[in-house]
Amino acid sequence: PARPLRPALSIPPGVRNRRASTPNSFGRQAGTIGYEFIEEMDLVNHGARIGEEAVKLLTAKQCPSGLKTIILDGPQVALQVHESCGHPIELDRVLGMEAGFVGKSFLTTDKFNSNYRYGSDLVNLTADATIPGALGTFGWDDEGVPAQRTPIVTNGIFGGYLMSRDTAPLLGLTSNGCVRADGWNRLPMIRMTNVSLEPGTWSLDDLIADTDDGIFMSINKSWSIDDRRLNFQFGVEMAYEIKHGKFGEMLKNATYTGITPQFWGSCDAICKRDEWTVWGTPNCGKGEPMQVMRTGHGAAPARFRNVQVGVGNW
């Protein structure tokens, strides 16, 4: 089959009880931009493809179980960054000042500036509130700190948190401008800006061609992660076998699971900037009472080795 295209946005299923993948997809895009953004997504011309994919899912094979090489599409990498990097680097969580919704963090302060290995040498993560058009972009945070770019992971080594004026001095640092509230009647708190996986050097076509036996996963539909952001499972709406460097049959109910540092440590290829997009997350929840914040995550397709996939037949 031809290379599958990434989704323009989520299309609700027409007949839920017949679509064999039990859909709950979250494929969509969001940004701080005008109506030209809608035109660029070319929604009408994606309609036929999405319909064809829905029909194929009725008879698609079950995703196999076992250790596999997987390639995650850009939007799925973005969610992986959000859940396994973005939340655990919020310093209020690390210090136990906040645990609502997603718990605390495995990235405790003893790991800061200690050469703690978060991922492979290819993994570089940044928090950047200055990216034009991204949802996590602003001029100043709600404590009056200018927007800025902060290195989080450099060549696989952890080295940065999202901080506030009151938490940063506890590490002998100054705030890097990550405090926002979602309204006048809510307390400002540390929130993600645009937390991104920096691009690599591969094209997606070359990455597929370089993969002898694997699974390409696209369009998130479920996620689960423990209260320290370590042990996770993600499910996707649609996947394809990769055999001898080419796409094979469609798979349904594809899932993958892992432990955060080991998973990022298995990353051996990231696609280049031509494939890189800042994916918008308009509904990140935190706090009690809950505050909803808009964040962004730059990501390109990436490959991971020896990942546990599948949950058996269901």
Image (spheres, helix red, strand yellow):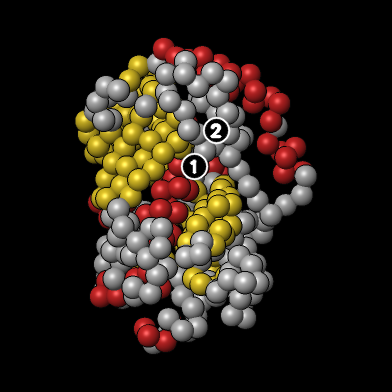
Crowd around label 2: few <14 · some 14–19 · many ≥20 (10 Å): some
Which residue in the structure is indicated by mark 1?
74
How far apart are the alpha carbons under marks 2 and 1? 8 Å
Question: Image point 54% across, 18% down: which residue?
Answer: 15
- Relative placement, left or right, of 4 versus 40 is left
Q: Is residue 153 visible?
A: no
Nearest the viewer among 225 and 126 is 225
Which labelled disc corresponds to residue 228?
none
- The answer to whether residue 254 is above or below residue 150 is above
The foreground one among 157 and 190 is 190
Q: Residue at x 34, y 75 (%)?
A: 95
Q: Is residue 273 above or below residue 250?
A: below
What's the amino acid at mark 1? Gly
Mark sitting earlier along the chain (2/1): 2
User: Residue sitting at 24 percent across and 26 percent down?
Assistant: 312
Position of 230 with respect to 205 (left or right) is: left
**In this rendering, would 7 be left or right of 219?**
right
> Quadrant of residue 233 in the image?
top left
Q: Secondary structure at mark 1?
A: helix
- Residue annotated with mark 2: 6
Q: Looking at the picture, does residue 270 appear above or below residue 96?
A: above
The answer to whether residue 262 of the structure is visible from this angle is yes
Spot occupied by residue 251 in the image (x, y as percentages of width and height):
38, 22
Residue 152 in the image, given as x and y percentages of width and height: 41, 66
Seen at 78% across and 44% down, the residue is 35
Asked if marks 2 and 1 touch (Cβ < 8 Å), the reply is: yes
Under tag 2, what secondary structure? loop
> As shown in the figure, which amino acid type bears the numbered disc 2?
Arg
Which image quadrant for residue 216?
A: top left
The quarter of the image holding the C terminus is top left
Label 1: how many Cα within 10 Å (few below 14, some 14–19, many 20+): many
